[in-house]
Amino acid sequence: QVQLVESGGGLVQAGGSLRLSCAASGRTFSVYAMGWFRQAPGKEREFVAAATWNGGMTYNADSVKGRFTISRDNAKNTVYLQMNSLKPEDTAVYYCAANSVIGLRLSVPTSYNYWGQGTQVTVSS
């Protein structure tokens, strides 16, 4: 089992920044990639970004390219999501997820077998 704990959410004005953290514990050696997803009220869970744990590959959704950056600190078993130039439409609950199966599409929620509890991000206009 892998446990994931997110932190760093909050309320910010449009144009501001936040950094989310996701600390992993447990069987972290089994993790191939980590991802961030978000879900706004009444909407489906949406892919934001992903990074392979050891290979250094990163992926971003078109809606956040140039604004959000995913990074990882392997020594701390932590993945980060730096969010800049935030917009009201970025308001959502943000979830961290871990994938332990190589070859699956990292932009799809069903590719992940471990999830954090979520952290609320609210961007005011």
Image: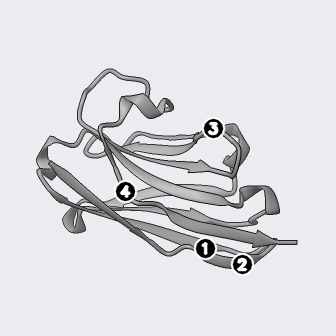
The picture places residue 71, in percent across and down from the top left corner, at: 43, 57
Q: Amino acid at mark 3?
A: Glu
Earlier sequence position, callout 4 versus callout 3: 3
| Residue in the picture at 71% in, 61% down | 91
Residue 18, numbered label: 1
Earlier sequence position, callout 3 versus callout 2: 2
Task: Please identify the residue farthest to the front as the structure is shown.
Answer: 42
Kindly state the secondary structure of the residue where label 1 is placed.
strand
Q: CA distance from mark 4 to mark 3?
A: 17 Å
Q: CA distance from mark 3 to mark 1?
A: 22 Å
Q: Are marks 1 and 4 in contact (CB under 8 Å)?
A: no
The crowd level at tag 3 (other Cα within 10 Å; few <14, some 14-19, many 20+) is few
Residue 115 in view = yes
The crowd level at tag 4 (other Cα within 10 Å; few <14, some 14-19, many 20+) is many
Q: Amino acid at mark 2?
A: Val
Earlier sequence position, callout 1 versus callout 2: 2
